[in-house]
Amino acid sequence: MRRVPWVALGLLLAGVGIRMAAWLRPVSEWLPGCGFKRLTGFACATCGMTRCVLALGAGDWRGAFHWHPVAALFAMAMPALALWDLRRAWRNEAYPGLPDSRAARLSVWALLVITWVVQAARGI
């Protein structure tokens, strides 16, 4: 039985969604905005993500990085991640287990907190 490249399929759909976001730019002004920021006055960790996706859809990588650096970096890594997953599926290899280390978990949390602080400081 062949393994299904779920990550590659998901990234393909994400890429199609990002490309389709270019068509949403004219109506993006009507989007409600961040509810957390509206309630608290502070940016949340994902503030700027919608504008980042809209910039990616338009091919504006500099603008995407400005609005949400982590999402733009992830978008840059998407092709390599998709190729890895296709190779893994072709070789019929299982997905590797998630790292069970405190350092890995703390790194993810640190990235989230740092992103949140940067977005809040910039007033995104």
Image (cartoon, rainbow, N blue to C red):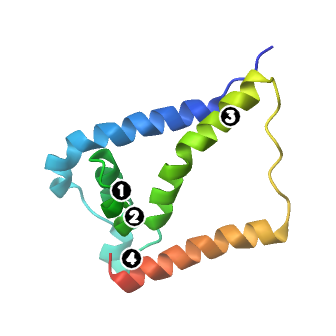
- Neighbourhood count class around disc 4 (C-alpha, 10 Å): few under 14, some 14–19, many 20 upward: many
Helix or strand or loop: what does disc 4 sit on?
loop
Q: Amino acid at mark 3?
A: Asp
- The answer to whether 72 is drawn above or below residue 6 in the figure is below
Mark 1 lies on residue: 61
Residue 40 as seen in the image, left or right of residue 3: left
> Counting residues from the N terminus, which is met first, the one under dot 2 or under dot 3?
2
C-alpha separation, residue under disc 2 versus residue under disc 3: 25 Å
Q: Is residue 7 visible?
A: no
Mark 4 lies on residue: 43
Q: Say which of 94 and 47 sits in front.
A: 94
- Neighbourhood count class around disc 1 (C-alpha, 10 Å): few under 14, some 14–19, many 20 upward: some
Q: Amino acid at mark 2?
A: Phe
> Counting residues from the N terminus, which is met first, the one under dot 1 or under dot 4?
4
**Quadrant of the image for the C terminus?**
bottom left
**Quadrant of the image for the N terminus?**
top right
Mark 2 lies on residue: 65
Residue at 85% in and 59% down: 100
Residue contact at pointers 1 and 2, CB within 8 angstroms: yes
Q: Is residue 26 visible?
A: yes
Residue 29 as seen in the image, left or right of residue 83: left
Residue contact at pointers 1 and 4, CB within 8 angstroms: no
Give the foreground label among 1 and 4: 1
> Counting residues from the N terminus, which is met first, the one under dot 4 or under dot 2?
4
Q: Position of residue 33 (x, y in %)?
A: 28, 63
Residue at 75% in and 31% down: 88
Q: Amino acid at mark 4?
A: Ala
